[in-house]
Image (cartoon, rainbow, N blue to C red):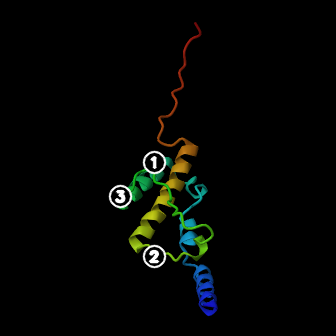
Amino acid sequence: MRWNLVVLASCLAMAGCAGSSLAERQDENVESSLQFDSVPCDQLLAQRNALAQQYRLPRDAKPAFSNSGTGFGPFTPDVRSKARRDAEQASGRIDAMNRSITRRDCGKPAKQNKFALPS
């Protein structure tokens, strides 16, 4: 019995250190929005819409995180399909694009400067 626990603990530790744990791969889906600040607004909106359409995601997609048991996140192996991993990575990229779009007020009409005589 004691030998089984030692083997189980070492297998769990190795699974967490292998770089393929579910928690680690889901954390990789979160991207910085600063990388999109140099992209012109119209191009960024087009890229976001194309990415959402390609993976059949909403335009306001956000990265998803599974709720594994307390303390077992680093030890849970990632068994998601490649298509699902790619779609969740696209969700993180769309979220980063949306944060840049919101911060720069892209997609909103430019303010009209009205020149009027004082009344």
Asked if residue 114 lies left or right of residue 13, the reply is left
Closest to the camera, between mark 3 and mark 2, is: 2
Residue 88 picture location, percent across and down: 46, 64
Residue 5 x/y as whole percent: 61, 87
Seen at 60% across and 79% down, the residue is 16
Q: Earlier in the sequence, mark 1 or mark 2?
A: 1
Q: Earlier in the sequence, mark 1 or mark 3?
A: 1
Q: Is residue 54 above or below residue 13?
A: above
Q: Residue at x 55, y 55 (%)?
A: 36
From the top left corner, tell me how far across and down residue 114 is, in percent.
Answer: 53, 21
Q: Earlier in the sequence, mark 3 or mark 2?
A: 3
Which secondary structure, mark 3?
loop
Q: Which residue is mark 2?
A: 79
| Structural distance between the alpha carbons of marks 1 and 3 | 21 Å
Name, please, the residue furthest toward the front.
1
Q: How far is mark 1 from mark 2, CA to CA? A: 37 Å
State the residue position of label 3: 56
**x, y (%) of residue 27?**
57, 66
In this picture, is 105 found above or below 15?
A: above
Is there a contact, CB below 8 Å, between mark 1 and mark 3? no
Q: Which residue is mark 1?
A: 42
Numbered-mark total: 3
Judging depth in this view, the residue of 38 and 29 nearest the camera is: 29
Q: Amino acid at mark 1?
A: Asp
Q: Secondary structure at mark 2?
A: loop
Q: What amino acid is at disc 2?
A: Val
Instruction: Identify the residue shown where x is 60% and y is 73%.
Output: 74
* Front-most of residues 90 and 78: 78
